[in-house]
Image: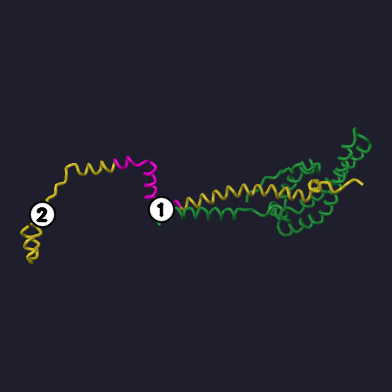
Amino acid sequence: MNDSNHASKGRSLSPDDLQIWKVETEIPSRFQAEVWQKIAARQVEQPVWSRFIEWITLTLVRPQFAAALILVAGLMGGGLAQWKVQRVNARSFNALQSQYIASVDPYAHANAFSGAEMRMP
Amino acid sequence: MKPITAVLIAAVVVAIASFGGSYFAGRSCCKVGLPGSEMEWLRQTFQLNEPQFAAVKQLHESYQPTCEKLCKRIAVANEKLDHLIQSSQSVTPEVEAALRESAEVREDCRKAMLGHIYQVAAEMSTPNRERYLKMMTPRIIMPPTGHPSTPVQSAEEPPCH
């Protein structure tokens, strides 16, 4: 206090003055334990999915995991396309095969040319 | 934008682009129903080179008038037989004659079609020729009746592209 009075009267504080001024703190003995207990209690209160999302969010922002996710997404898109295109190609194949056979088989023509236009004389 | 959002958007965009690219790259030829698409299909399925394809196409085009003529004969014979069957109570001489006529038309069709099939097969390389004959043989052995309910039988499995 005297030092601060000295300072207010125009005298600047010296390093020695700063050394004299000590802040006395008293950390409770169980401070650290209580902090960890509070963290653990907060985690227990969070639902599992919430903790999972938090974990995913923190993991995927890392470059290697983000790159892996994008690569897997690309592979899955390509894989799904291949599965779909095989089915479409198989249907097209069968339809085009039928179209070709119909173009060379007179009986297949006759299915379309039903004879409704051809009447007995 | 949060980093996680950017990562997820990038993943979705890459997945969609990958799907689109793979799909359109993997689609094989030919729109069904378009004129000439069955010839393009034949070319790709039986791996015809340019001279082979030109020859097969020529054979196909020259066969069409025969096919049309036979088709009309089938339609007339079936119509006649159908009418006689509906209007008769027993197998009359007219019904017998119509049956014979229908059988003759069927025989002529099988011969003409088989002749065309052999000509087309002769233009193909050996393994493809065998596959082509295997595909077309059921139409000769078990020809449909010309009735709309008769399905087209498929003896060929789609090749892998």
C-alpha separation, residue under disc 1 versus residue under disc 2: 47 Å
Question: Horizontal and vertical percent for residue A56?
Answer: 39, 48
Q: Residues within 10 Å of mark 2 (few under 14, many from 20)?
A: few
Residue at 80%, 51% in the rendered image: B116
Residue A48 part of the magenta segment: yes
SS under mark 2:
loop
- Pointer 2: what residue? A22
Q: Chain of mark 2?
A: A
Is A73 on the left-hand or right-hand side of B114? Answer: left
Q: Picture quarter containing residue A51? A: top left
- Pointer 1: what residue? B4
Residue at 79%, 40% in the rendered image: B142
Q: Residues within 10 Å of mark 1 (few under 14, many from 20)?
A: some
Residue B156 part of the magenta segment: no
Tell me the kind of residue under disc 2: Lys
Magenta segment boundaries in residue numbering: A41-69
Between B46 and B85, the residue placed more toward the observer is B85
List the single residue furthest toward the right: B93
What color does chain A have in the rendering?
A: yellow
Who's green, chain-wise? B
Is A3 on the left-hand or right-hand side of B5? Answer: left
Q: Picture quarter containing residue A30? A: top left
Residue B119 visible? The answer is yes
